Image (cartoon, rainbow, N blue to C red):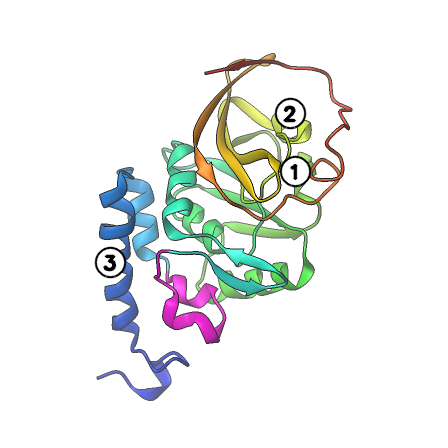
Amino acid sequence: MASPESRHSTGRAPNDFAAQRARMVDEQIRARGVRDPLVLASIAKVPREVFVPDLTRAHAYDDSPLPIGSDQTISQPYIVAVMIAALTLKGGERVLDVGTGSGYAAAVLAGIASEVISIERLAPLAERARATLASLGIRNVEVRQGDGSRGCPEHAPYDAIVVAAGGPQVPESLKAQLAVGGRLVMPVGTDQLAQKLLRVTRASETELSVETLTDVRFVPLIGAEGWGAADRNDAAPIRTRRT
């Protein structure tokens, strides 16, 4: 039996969470079509319970998003898996994660990629995510506080970019920071309450292809190239092919 010190504040023993995590991977993710072995293996290792507030820790493995403070949420586990699987990572990539939130998706990405740059607009969430990732010994994630809609050009280009907030369009800055052959996954829609999950692939320096994956609901992307800036386009045009 686990000692009281090794139990979480909910009173659950760590092996209880491990069992819930295994069921989550099997029933919520693999059974619904996500089969990428790297994604499944990484999600199976990341303790989602440490990324949620104490009051909701007992629900860490529910098939739903959960509040994490500052009017933000940790995404439904299945959606995290779908978005990361859509990046088709092979291991060793440099990834830009826009919308750190709790840091959970960054932790899953860190189990596959060699380097993750994660940007969070809200300072309290960024600070908490840094602390949580550090407590787990995750060293290949750099959490920055700032405007994620502008990306992080000093570390570009990125082999993959994932955006955990819905925007009216894919920011031109993020397109410009995507490497040739790289993929960007982001919720996009004219309604702040509902979006389509898009995958953008850079086919060449001048051409992007766009696929629609599924319907999703995310918090709005706030920033210079997010909501409130839908008509702004300071970048050079790039030909886009939709599939």
Residue 130 horizontal/vertical position (percent)? 57, 61
Asked if the magenta segment contains residue 157, the reply would be no
Asked if the magenta segment contains residue 61, the reply would be yes
Q: Is residue 14 left or right of residue 184?
A: left
Describe the element under mark 3 as helix, strand or loop. helix
Give the spatial CA distance, label 1 vs label 3: 34 Å
Label 2, residues with CA under 10 Å away: few <14, some 14-19, many ≥20? many
Front in this rendered view, residue 31 or 217: 217
Q: Which residue is mark 1?
A: 151
Q: What amino acid is found at the position of numbered circle 3 in the picture?
A: Ala
Q: Which residue is mark 2?
A: 176
Describe the element under mark 1 as helix, strand or loop. loop
Q: Residue furthest bottom?
A: 4
Q: Earlier in the sequence, mark 3 or mark 2?
A: 3
Q: Residue at x 76, y 35 (%)?
A: 229
Front in this rendered view, residue 132 or 139: 132
Q: Residue at x 62, y 37 (%)?
A: 167
Q: Earlier in the sequence, mark 1 or mark 3?
A: 3
Q: Which residue is mark 3?
A: 22
Q: Residue at x 30, y 54 (%)?
A: 44
Residue 67 is marked as: none
Residue 212 horizontal/vertical position (percent)? 46, 26
Q: Which residues are magenta?
A: 47-63
Q: Is residue 102 left or right of residue 22?
A: right
Q: What amino acid is found at the position of numbered circle 2 in the picture?
A: Ala
Are the residues flagged by discs 2 and 1 in contact, CB closer than 8 Å? yes
